Image (cartoon, grey):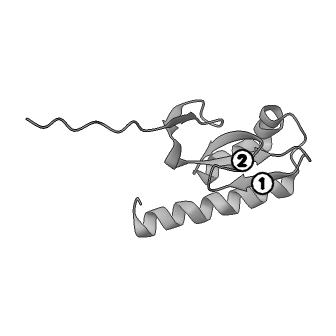
Amino acid sequence: MIFLKKRRIPMRKDLLTNTMQPKKELVRVVIDKEKNISVDPTGKKPGRGAYVSLDPEKISDAKEKKVLDRSLGTKVPDTFYDELYSYVDHQKARKELFGDK
């Protein structure tokens, strides 16, 4: 009898919904030592990170409530929220078009 080892799925807390979700379904936002804020699609950039869901409506809500400001400990410009919105919208469209990968 062969037993297959079940792979552990890494989970992260979604900052916008406050729920635990698989890491692949979230995108990481990172702030580095120079206070530069960027989207981290690989999840490997150095710095303080926060995970957000791939839901454009949630990003709009986060912009209004300034959710990332509190989590990252600095003022996040509105232009970054717009950049994050377009990235998430693009990723959601890709996922719908090509399916889960």
Which secondary structure, mark 1? strand
Kind of residue at badge 2: Val
Sort mark 1 into few (<14), some (14-19) or many (20+) by Cα contacts within 10 Å: some
Residue shown at the point (40%, 59%) measured from the top left: 100
Residue underneath mark 1: 38
Name the residue: 66% across, 61% down. Answer: 87
From this view, report whether residue 88 is shown above or below residue 70.
below
Residue 3 as seen in the image, left or right of residue 19: left
Instruction: Pick the residue in front: 95 or 24.
Output: 24
In the image, residue 37 lies at what x, y percent? 82, 50
Total marks in image: 2
User: Which image quarter is the C terminus in?
Assistant: bottom left
Residue 50 against residue 56 in the figure, above or below: above
Q: Is residue 16 above or below residue 83?
A: above
Task: Please say whether residue 65 is visible from this viewpoint.
Answer: no
User: Looking at this rendering, what residue extends furthest in the bottom direction?
Assistant: 97
Q: Nearer the viewer, residue 29 or 82?
A: 29
Q: Are the residues flagged by discs 1 and 2 in contact, CB closer than 8 Å? A: yes
Residue 90 point in image, percent of width and height: 60, 65
Q: Amino acid at mark 1?
A: Ser
Q: Which mark is residue 29?
A: 2
Specify the quadrant that holds the N terminus: top left
Farthest front residue?
1
Dot 2 crowding, Cα within 10 Å, few <14, some 14–19, many 20+: many
Which residue occupies the foreground of this view, 45 or 99? 45
The residue shown at (83%, 37%) is 69
Query: Does residue 84 appear left or right of residue 2 in this picture?
Result: right
Give the camera-side residue of 85 and 14. 14
Residue 77, which numbered label? none
